[in-house]
Amino acid sequence: MANNKTTFFATQIGSILATAGSAVGLGNIWRFPTVTGQNGGAAFILIYLFFNIFLGVACMLTEFIVGRNGASNPLRAYIKAGRHKSWGIIGILSLLCGSLILSFYSVVAGWCVYYLYLAITGGVLGSFDHIQTTFTTLVSTEGIYTCCAISVLFVVLTHLIIVQGVQKGIERASTCMVPLLILLLIVLGIASCSLPGAWKGLEFLFRPDFSKVTAHTFYDAMSMAFFSLSLGTACLVTYASYFRKDANIGRYALQISIIDVLVAILAGITIFPAAFSVGVEPDAGPSLIFLTIPNVFTSAFSPTAGYYLSILFYFLLVLAALTSTISMHEIGTSLLSQELKTSRTMAGNIITVFCSIMGILCALSFSHPDIGLFGSTLFDNFDSFTSKVLMPVGAFATCVLVGWIMPRLTIVRQLTSNARYPWPRFMLELFIFLVKFVCPTLIGIIFVVNIFFTN
Ligand code: TRP
């Protein structure tokens, strides 16, 4: 029961790994290499690093401040921070946002489970035609039952961890899964770099070509940093409410951002050398992990190595997705269990049923595009609505709340954990300046560009 707020993560490392698990996800392993490929490689990575470390850390800290100060679910935390009931709207929007993201994310996570099964049974490798047919069948009317079933399976898997509780479920699972995930990426990275011609991939990844940088590169880097750090959905507010009073949130934020960037770069080191060594374009788009990668495993490695490496790769994706879906599910579970005064299990059931139904509709919308609004599939609707509207609104509101509304004393107390970890004055002023002016302006730009200039 989480009705009375005595729930905390048990250890520092558990708090960091759970939050890092939320940050590290399909965004790092799937989206980051794709967007890096589309934006010309190393130059994009440098810009991404800048946004992740400066703005990402500042925004992450705003959520940590609201969360730990609130010591409750996002609804109450925002009301307490803003000292007005209307701030609760941001908490409610976060519940909606987390649940919608979980719904469409579980579809892709389900594909990863299916590919793990295929990898184990040897069905992921084969001619290019075979690989192509496997994926198109999965998302067509023929594979639709499988597709729906595996996305529900993924939500249920998340549910089973969530109902174990904050320490025994979330913390324990993340403490096992995040280090394992990093280890797997290192193994796969080494295998990929050992391929002939791999250096071309590394060069692409590490030698910046600034001629490829356009205004769009900045915009892509910024949105990627926001999604990757799970900002704007109160996911971090929820997790921060489980941080202990003596947690050094400044250090946490920096460490989580570094883990997030390292995992993204490691994913790049795994994917680009392998892709270049078989002559596949690195900007293959979202099909990268379901078409390009199986092709790489088939043609670049011996059949035995390809078999085992493909299992490791899809297992890695499942782990990465799971540590993220846990955090999305927890937003709603914590909020509903406290507000409806019910158990975590009951609250978890509500979120699981809702997200399973929505997940099925998202999965169905691939083969039945009429399920959706404005000429797009429901999957795309949810993706766009959350990343273009709900997440920027949440992040913007949190910056305004911390930068302009919360008393400075409360902010300083949270940042320094009641003067336990003093901040140099310069750093404090820089943080306040970023949160007051820079972050809201940049988030505002993302919002406007997203709504008016992209389709
Ligand atoms: N950061 C995760 C990724 O990179 C996705 C994610 C997890 C997320 N929790 C979230 C995104 C909460 C938004 C909100 O894949």
Image: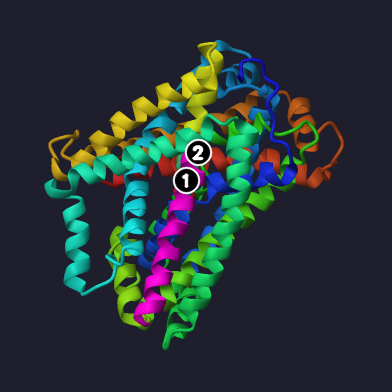
Q: Tell me the magenta residue range.
A: 302-326
* Closer to the camera in the image, 310 or 189: 310
Image quadrant holding the N terminus, namely top right
The residue drawn where x is 37% and y is 72% is: 307
Question: Where, by quadrant of the figure, is residue 36 drawn?
Answer: bottom left
Please determine whether, in this image, residue 188 is positioned above or below residue 115.
below
Q: Decide whether residue 325 is among the magenta residues.
A: yes
Badge 1: residue crowd in 10 Å (few <14, some 14–19, many ≥20): many
Read off the residue under disc 1.
322
Q: Position of residue 89 (x, y in %)?
A: 48, 19
Question: Where, by quadrant of the figure, is residue 59 drawn?
Answer: top right
Read off the residue under disc 2.
326
Give amino acid for label 1.
Answer: Leu
Give amino acid for label 2.
Answer: Ile
> SS class of the residue under badge 1?
helix
Query: Image check: 161 left or right of 305?
Result: right
Q: Decide whether residue 80 is among the magenta residues.
A: no
The residue drawn where x is 47% and y is 58% is: 316
- Alpha carbon separation for disc pair 1 and 2: 6 Å
Circles 1, 2 touching at the beta carbon (< 8 Å): yes
The residue drawn where x is 27% and y is 65% is: 123
* Closer to the camera in the image, 242 or 143: 143
Q: Position of residue 420 (x, y in %)?
A: 87, 37
* Closer to the camera in the image, 366 or 436: 366
